[in-house]
Image (tube, grey):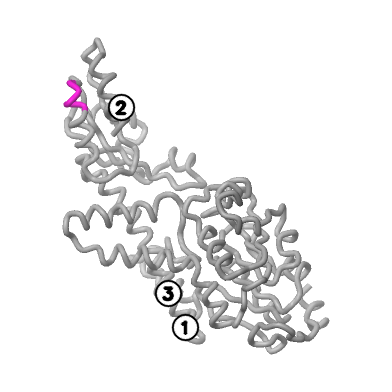
Amino acid sequence: MNAAHHLGQLLAKRDTNHRVVLVNKSTVPIGSARLLQQILDEHGVRNFGVASNPEFLPQGNAVEASRKPDRVIVGADTAEDFELLRRVYSQFVNHVRIRYIETTPETAEAIKYMANALLLTYISFWNGVGGRLAETFENTLMEDLKLGVTSDSRISTWGSYVSNGAGGSCFGKDIQSLIYQLNRSGRSTDLLQAVYNINEYQKTYLIDRAVHEGGFNFNNKSIALLGLAFKKRTNDMRDSSSLKVVESLLARGVASIRAYDPLATEEAAKWFDPEHNHLFERISYHDTVFEAIQGTDALFISTDWEEFRGLSSTIRKGTRPPYLIIDGRRMIPDHDMLVDLGYQYLSVGGALLSSDKQPERYGEGIVVPEPDEELVEESG
C-alpha cells in the first residue's frame, strides 16, 4: 500500500499523458490489482492501467525457466494494455510450445495461488498417502508404487518423490493466504488445510518414528544434519524443513548438531543465531559430510543434494554401528548393505530397517558386536 500511494503521488505529477501500465509480478491476494487501481484513482493519476503478470520461476533454475517458461499469464482490462504487454513478451506470443494466456487481473492472481496449492497437494498426497502405505504395510515398495501409479498418463510424476516436506518461500505462505482469503468469504477450506497440515507434520515425523519405532533416545546425543536449504541448488532457508528438524532435535535435548550444506551454511548461521536462542550454540557447521558425521550417534538427511546420493561408503568410514540413519529424501539406494553391517536405516516411504547384528532398541550401556569383516570387504 505504501508503494501504491508513493507511485500515485509521482504519477499524478507527470507532465506527459502517455499511457502507463503498472504490472504486478508478486503473488498477492486476489483483488490487489483492483485495489492498486483505486489508490491511483484517488491520487488523480490519468491514462493508466493495472495488470497482473504472476511469476512462476522455480528456485534453482530460475534463469533457464525465465527464458523457456511453460506459460505467461497476463491479466488486464483493456485491449491497449494487452497490446503493450504483447510487445514486452513478443518472443512468447504465438509460440509453438509456450502458452501465452490473457485474462482478467483477478483470474491471473487466482491462477498463481491455485497452481501453488495444487503442487503442494501433489506433494502432500504422496507423502500422506503413498508414503504412509509403504511405511505401514510390509512388502509395499515405494519406488514400484510410484511407477505403477504414475504410469497412468492422466497422473503426473511431479510430486511423487516422497520427502520430509516441502519448504521455500512460496508453497506454505501461498496456501495459508488462500485459506485466509476463502475463510474470510465464508468458504470451506478443509482440503487446503489438510494439505498444509500434512506438509508441516512431514518435516519432523521421522524424528518421532525414530523414537517410537526404533527406540532411539535423542537426549544428550550428537546428530549430523545433512542439508539445510529447502532444496538443492539454492542457499534459501525460508521455511526449510531443516528449521523444524533443528527445533525438534533441540527440544529433545540433543547435545550437538553437526551441520553440512554445500551452499547454505552461511545463511543458516543467520537463522540459527545464538544471540536469538542460546540453544543454537549447540550447532556447528562443517565443510564436508565426512567431517559432519564425526563423533555423531545418528544422521538426518534433510535436503536432496546430489552428493548425498549414495553416502554408504562415507558413513562406513566415519561411523560405527549402532548408528541410526534417518533419510528424509531416500538418498541412499544401497542402504541394505549398511543394514547388514549393523546400522539402522529409517527413510520416508519405508519401514524401519535393522539387522540382528544390532540391538532393536537404543539405550545406555548396550554392547554391540563388531561389524562382520567379510561383509565389509564384500561391500568394497
Q: So how many labels did they put on this image?
A: 3
Q: Earlier in the sequence, mark 2 or mark 1?
A: 2
Q: Residue at x 34, y 52 (%)?
A: 174
Q: Which mark is residue 136?
A: 1
Q: Residue at x 56, y 59 (%)?
A: 303
Instruction: Give the side of residue 23 with respect to residue 41, left or right.
Output: right
Amino acid carrying label 3: it is: Gly
Q: Secondary structure at mark 1?
A: helix
Q: Secondary structure at mark 3?
A: helix
Amino acid carrying label 1: it is: Thr
Alpha-carbon distance for marks 2 and 1?
Answer: 55 Å
Q: Which mark is residue 130?
A: 3
Q: Secondary structure at mark 2?
A: helix
Q: Is residue 308 a member of the stretch shown in magenta?
A: no
Displayed quadrant of residue 337 = bottom right
* Image spot of residue 67 (x, y percent): 44, 38
* Image spot of residue 78 (x, y percent): 17, 31
Q: Earlier in the sequence, mark 2 or mark 3?
A: 2
Q: Residue at x 26, y 42 (%)?
A: 101
Mark 1 neighbour density, 10 Å: few (under 14) some (14–19) many (20 or more): few
Quadrant of the image for the C terminus?
bottom right
Residue farthest along the bottom direction in this orientation: 356
Q: Please tell me whether residue 28 is drawn above or below residue 349 in the rendered image.
A: above
Q: Earlier in the sequence, mark 3 or mark 1?
A: 3
Q: Nearer the viewer, mark 2 or mark 3?
A: 3
Magenta range? 40-44
* Image spot of residue 356 (x, y percent): 69, 89
Q: Is residue 43 a member of the stretch shown in magenta?
A: yes
